[in-house]
Image: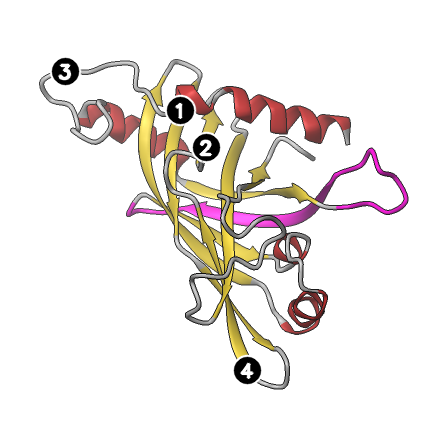
Amino acid sequence: MRRLKMIFLGLGCIAALCLTSCIKDDDSDSSSGLSKAEITRCYNAVLGDYYGKLVYPATNPENYHDGLDTLDVQWTVNADTTLFVKGFPASAVVEQLRDTELKKALQEQSTLQNTKCQMVFTSLQNSYVQFALGAEKIAFPISYKDADHTLNVYFWADGSSFGEKDITSGDMIVRLVMGGAYLDDDTKTNLFTGNNYDAISVPIFLTTALK
């Protein structure tokens, strides 16, 4: 578990770096500062299928020092520069909800869901590629209080969600930040634990660094 905490700390440290690019020239992409040739190199470096762990905040009643949990997860970077997460688990969301009945409904009824993340490459170095991510919402169908509903989970896309691939080792670590969960079309009541009037950030990680 100590290694998981180091991953959380390490990715927090590179957040600022991920939003800057290392080279700008006349042939650069206006959204990232990288040249077209550099973006192609970035894309070729991250293209493919990945199998790793999803790490998320969770309470361990038997060990209060243990605040993380892991699940198997797969993701793919495809031809249109999209990172596609396969089988996002409801467990990562259940842990963040404050309504006991809603937690139970999601845990018992929801299957794994998929989500897409649009990638923007932000930095290319000799040994790694960094990118920002904009993740689509995840919609979990549930039965809650004797009616069918959809629990919509949204992610922050303001630079909080990003990733990095180590070109040498092949390891990739992705940070996604859940910002809220809303029932059906009610976007005023955030169902995550915390103050409804405050911004809520729940960082989760996809990593191939854990074997």
Mark 1 and mark 3: Cα distance apart in space: 19 Å
Amino acid residing under circle 4: Asp
Q: Earlier in the sequence, mark 1 or mark 4?
A: 1
Determine whether the residue tagged by mark 4 lies in a helix, strand or loop: strand
User: What label does residue 148 carry, if any?
Assistant: 4
Tell which of 139 and 184 is nearer to you: 184
Mark 1 lies on residue: 18
Determine whether the residue tagged by mark 2 lies in a helix, strand or loop: strand
User: What label does residue 25 carry, if any?
Assistant: 3
Determine whether the residue tagged by mark 1 lies in a helix, strand or loop: helix
Rendered position, 130 above or below 47: above
Residue that appears at 44% across and 68% down: 186
Residue that appears at 59% across and 35% down: 208
- Indicate the position of residue 24 as horizontal and vertical percent values: 19, 16
Q: Nearer the viewer, mark 1 or mark 3?
A: 1
- Indicate the position of residue 97 as horizontal and vertical percent values: 64, 57
The magenta-colored residue range is 59-80
- For residue 53, what is the image quadrant? top right
Mark 1 and mark 4: Cα distance apart in space: 40 Å
Name the side, left or right, on which 52 lies relative to 68.
left
Q: Earlier in the sequence, mark 3 or mark 4?
A: 3
Mark 2 lies on residue: 163
Instruction: Say whether marks 1 and 3 touch (CB < 8 Å).
Output: no
Mark 4 and mark 2: Cα distance apart in space: 35 Å
Instruction: Say whether marks 4 and 2 touch (CB < 8 Å).
Output: no
Q: Nearer the viewer, mark 1 or mark 4?
A: 4
